[in-house]
């Protein structure tokens, strides 16, 4: 094999031109396929936007028609009929133009809805390894597995097509083929890692929702690089040519260095090691990225180095844009309107504990807007000099008419590292005046969803996952635009009672406001491990009396504010099974005719239902889905176990009801947020 020839910073083997033409065709084909996938996802995003717009139009038409009917009915009432307000509401219900704006009512929408339902049922299920020590080995959801299978099929085809020929060039042909397939994937790895993701902006996603694919493309890259180097090394071993090759071809050493970086990154990115010291993982990961690109640039010949420059362009664009945003969001000019606590550089950050291990962080004077479900990166030098952490914004955005200087609040559960240190600081600073920190923010990130385009909304969260679901609930209730949502069910799962203190007051306010805007709101808080709610002997304890808004044992009152003669009964058992007890059978039925829709509410509106033990997720989802006449959206934020349970419950229910397959059952959308990327 002829090793002569220098090309740029690296060596070029003379046998490469024999295979280069077809290898370059495959490399271009990779990006053609990528462009097709992105284009398809963009088209689907446009179809979804049109569907949401259509639903809003239907809701607006319904609202306008109803308003005209109300006016006519009111005039008739005054002039001749003398009917009461209840009759007027009934007439409003009968004359409504569109009863269910989220329901499919024509053939093209039916075809699209059926295809969407099939894809959803295929993508939602997830197998979970229940052993806590090995839960990280759980495979991705079925949809991601199928997507990865398609990606691997393309890569496997490119690696092997017309290359496995048993001749004198067998090892070189496969080695060069995999070299091209490897270097072609490098820009995609860096594009998917960008926080200011061009791909995400195009398809309507966000960087954290693309991060899983970034990891798997990186692992695929490690495999193709290993095949590339392994076949060349095998040839050199057979010819007893290894040491001479290393002396004659310095580029080989740089290639081995790049491969070592990939191996190190793969090992440290495994969940057990990543969670042991997340801050260290992030720092070494950031440092490894430019080192890998430099080693690769020295290794590859000049005619393939455009891939390296493509990756450098992607990472440079991301960092430059993030730097500019950081300056804009954290540096103030010394004139114009200011708020209390304004700092010219950074933001005033106040911290306080809520319960034993929940830290509430308040960031003052934030001049940016956000939407429910988005998150920011927070850097507090005094707590972590080299650490910035993604944190979900726990409060809804206030419009400029309400407040010029907004505050961002985030709730952090103390575990280890940064979260534990900031909790300790808040504990020590409790009650100390003028105890504040300086923090820097970056964001907001995340692609918010149009939750108001669904008739029924189910919000499920665990612990601080309520920071994701509660702002969604509040944004729906305070929305000033036309919405399709008529019913909301909110479930919060916590281990101990003190974990809910930060959210209870806001949930009570949400219940009161839901009555005003005529949205049916049910709230349940499931406490899974609270021995304090049991009797001294571990027996069942019942609470039935209410005094001035508080129960006899100091529990928050959850009695029926409409029918005080039938209070809720909070029941707990020693077995910790779900035991929330509400006397539905004998409770007063309340008619809520909001927006013309007549709905029987059984139980007590304006109350939070507490249950002890793990809730039945399947039952929580099934009942409202079967009751709704339009489409339902389920949003869940929690750990792997809760997320997998909700995924499987939604997939099973969709299959049982044969959604959009001729039964008349309407769609179920699922949105998942996990605690970590």
Image: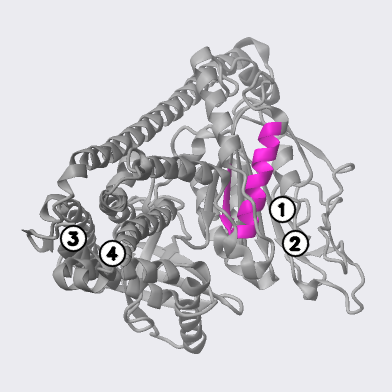
Label 1 secondary element: loop
The reply, left or right, for residue 145 in relation to residue 549 is left
Do labels 1 and 2 touch, CB within 8 Å? yes
Q: Which residue is mark 2?
A: 557
> Residue 631 has which mark?
none
How far apart in space, not on screen, are marks 3 and 4 (Cα)? 48 Å
Graded by Cα atoms within 10 Å as few (under 14), some (14 to 19) or many (20 or more), the crowding at tag 2 reads many
Tell me the quarter of the picture where residue 104 sits. top right
Tell me the quarter of the picture where residue 162 sits. top left
Graded by Cα atoms within 10 Å as few (under 14), some (14 to 19) or many (20 or more), the crowding at tag 1 reads many
How far apart in space, not on screen, are marks 1 and 2 (Cα)? 8 Å
Q: Earlier in the sequence, mark 2 or mark 3?
A: 3
Label 4 secondary element: loop
The answer to whether one can see residue 592 in this image is no
Which percent across, then down, holds residue 565?
Answer: 86, 51
Graded by Cα atoms within 10 Å as few (under 14), some (14 to 19) or many (20 or more), the crowding at tag 3 reads few
> Residue 607 has which mark?
1
Do labels 3 and 4 touch, CB within 8 Å? no
The reply, left or right, for residue 220 in relation to residue 675 is left
Magenta stretch: give its range.
634-655
The answer to whether one can see residue 660 in this image is yes
Mark 4 vs mark 2: give the one in front: 4
Mark 2 vs mark 3: give the one in front: 3
* Residue lying at 45% horizontally and 23% vertically, measured from the top left: 54
- 645 within the magenta span: yes
Graded by Cα atoms within 10 Å as few (under 14), some (14 to 19) or many (20 or more), the crowding at tag 4 reads few
Which percent across, then down, holds residue 259?
Answer: 31, 66
Label 3 secondary element: helix
> Residue 239 has which mark?
4
Do labels 2 and 3 touch, CB within 8 Å? no
């Amino acid at each position: 094999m002829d090793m002569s020839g220098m090309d740029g910073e690296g060596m070029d083997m003379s046998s490469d031109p024999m295979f280069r033409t077809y290898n370059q065709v495959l490399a271009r084909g990779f990006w053609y396929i990528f462009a097709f996938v992105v284009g398809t996802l963009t088209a689907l995003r446009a179809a979804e936007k049109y569907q949401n717009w259509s639903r809003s139009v239907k809701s607006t038409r319904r609202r306008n028609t109803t308003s005209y009917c109300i006016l006519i009915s009111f005039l008739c009432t005054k002039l001749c009929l003398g009917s009461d307000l209840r009759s007027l509401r009934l007439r409003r219900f009968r004359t409504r133009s569109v009863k269910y704006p989220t329901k499919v009512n024509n053939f093209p929408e039916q075809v699209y809805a059926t295809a969407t339902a099939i894809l959803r049922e295929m993508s939602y299920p997830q197998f979970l390894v229940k052993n806590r020590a090995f839960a990280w080995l759980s495979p991705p959801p079925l949809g991601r597995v199928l997507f990865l299978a398609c990606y691997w099929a393309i890569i496997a085809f490119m690696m092997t097509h017309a290359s496995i020929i048993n001749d004198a060039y067998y090892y070189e042909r496969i080695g060069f083929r995999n070299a091209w397939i490897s270097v072609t994937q490098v820009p995609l790895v860096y594009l998917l890692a960008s926080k200011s993701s061009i791909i995400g902006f195009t398809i309507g996603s966000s960087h954290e929702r693309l991060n899983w694919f970034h990891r798997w493309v990186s692992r695929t890259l490690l495999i193709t690089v290993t095949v590339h180097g392994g076949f060349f090394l095998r040839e050199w071993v057979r010819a007893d040519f290894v040491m001479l090759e290393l002396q004659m071809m310095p580029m080989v050493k740089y290639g081995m260095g790049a491969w070592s970086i990939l191996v190190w990154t793969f090992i440290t990115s495994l969940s057990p090691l990543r969670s042991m010291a997340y801050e260290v993982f992030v720092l070494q990961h950031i440092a490894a990225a430019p080192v890998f690109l430099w080693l690769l640039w020295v290794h590859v010949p000049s005619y393939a180095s455009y891939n390296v420059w493509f990756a450098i362009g992607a990472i440079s664009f991301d960092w430059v844009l993030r730097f500019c945003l950081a300056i804009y969001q954290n540096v103030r000019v010394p004139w114009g309107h200011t708020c209390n606590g304004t700092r010219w550089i950074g933001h005033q950050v106040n911290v306080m504990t809520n319960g034993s291990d929940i830290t509430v962080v308040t960031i003052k004077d934030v001049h940016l807007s956000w939407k429910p479900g988005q998150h920011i990166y927070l850097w507090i030098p005094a707590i972590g000099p080299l650490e910035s952490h993604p944190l979900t914004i726990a409060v809804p955005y206030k419009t400029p008419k309400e407040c010029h200087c907004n505050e961002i609040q985030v709730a952090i559960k103390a575990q280890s590292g940064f979260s534990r240190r900031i909790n300790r600081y808040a504990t020590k600073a409790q009650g100390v005046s003028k105890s504040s920190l300086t923090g820097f923010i970056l964001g907001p990130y995340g692609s918010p969803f149009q939750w108001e385009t669904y008739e029924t909304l189910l919000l499920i969260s665990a612990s601080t996952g309520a920071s994701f679901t509660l702002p969604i609930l509040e944004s729906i209730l305070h929305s000033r635009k036309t919405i399709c949502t008529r019913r909301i069910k909110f479930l919060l799962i916590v281990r101990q009672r003190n974990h809910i203190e930060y959210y209870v007051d806001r949930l009570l306010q949400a219940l009161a406001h839901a009555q005003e805007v005529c949205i049916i709101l049910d709230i349940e808080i499931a406490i899974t491990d609270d021995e304090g709610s049991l009797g001294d002997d571990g027996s069942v304890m019942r609470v039935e009396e209410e005094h001035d808004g508080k129960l006899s044992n100091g529990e928050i009152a959850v009695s029926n504010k409409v029918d005080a003669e039938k209070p809720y009964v909070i029941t707990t058992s020693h077995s910790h099974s779900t035991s929330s007890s509400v006397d539905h059978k004998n409770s007063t039925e309340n008619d809520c005719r909001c927006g013309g829709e007549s709905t029987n509410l059984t139980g007590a509106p304006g109350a939070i239902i507490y249950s002890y033990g793990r809730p039945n997720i399947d039952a929580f989802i099934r009942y409202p889905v079967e009751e709704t006449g339009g489409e339902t959206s389920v949003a869940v934020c929690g750990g792997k176990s809760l997320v997998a349970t909700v995924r499987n419950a939604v997939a099973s229910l969709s299959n049982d009801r044969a959604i959009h397959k001729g039964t008349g059952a309407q769609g179920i959308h699922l949105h998942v947020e996990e605690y970590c990327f």
